[in-house]
Image: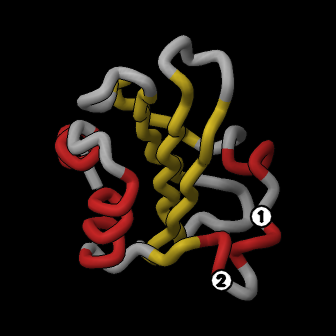
Amino acid sequence: MTKAELTTIVQVTEQKTITEELKRLGYIDCKKHKEYKNIRIDILFKGNLLETDTFPDSKRNRTYQGGIFTNVKGYENLEFIIININDDKNTFPIDMLIWAKEL
């Protein structure tokens, strides 16, 4: 996925719609996957990262930001997508979606 493609997805700023689009594109929810659910977040951040801008939702009480991780050691054949959902001050994380797809 390109940064521009992920930006388009993240700009929707609605978790259900984002999740549906990632599923449609063939990504797997790491939280529900037998093997991927055990990948530590610090391992992902040692890979290459491309980040989107941060976008507020329509009510302006949450923000959404996306990231694409590649070349993650031990998982070089996967591309990871992370969606950070934070409060409007970007200080309190509400959720982090982590998805993966084989390259």
Left or right, residue 7 beside residue 68 = left
Taking the view exactly as shown, the residue that stands out farthest to the top is 89
- The picture quadrant where one finds residue 29 is bottom right
Q: Which amino acid, by three-letter code, is at mark 2?
A: His
Q: In the orientation shown, which residue stands out farthest toward the front?
A: 59
Residue appearing at x 73%, y 87% in the figure:
34
Residue nearer the viewer, 87 or 46: 87
Circle 1 residues within 10 Å: few <14, some 14–19, many ≥20: few
The residue lying toward the viewer, choosing from 79 and 92, is 92
Q: Secondary structure at mark 1?
A: loop
The tag earlier along the polypeptide, 1 or 2, is: 2
Q: Position of residue 27 (x, y in %)?
A: 41, 74
Q: Is the residue marked by circle 2 packed among few (<14), some (14-19), or many (20+) residues within 10 Å?
A: few
Badge 2 element: loop
Q: Is residue 96 above or below residue 78?
A: above
- Give how far across and how far down residue 87 sits, in percent: 55, 25
The residue carrying mark 2 is 33
**Residue lying at 56% horizontally and 17% vertically, measured from the top left:** 90
Q: Seen in the image, is 39 located left or right of residue 52?
A: right
The residue type indicated by label 1 comes to: Ile
Name the residue rendered at 23%, 37% in the picture: 11
- For the N terminus, the quadrant is bottom left
Nearer to the camera, 22 or 44: 22
The label nearer to you, 1 versus 2, is: 2
Residue underneath mark 1: 39
Q: Residue at x 44, y 29 (%)?
A: 62
The image position of residue 13, as x and y in percent, is: 30, 40
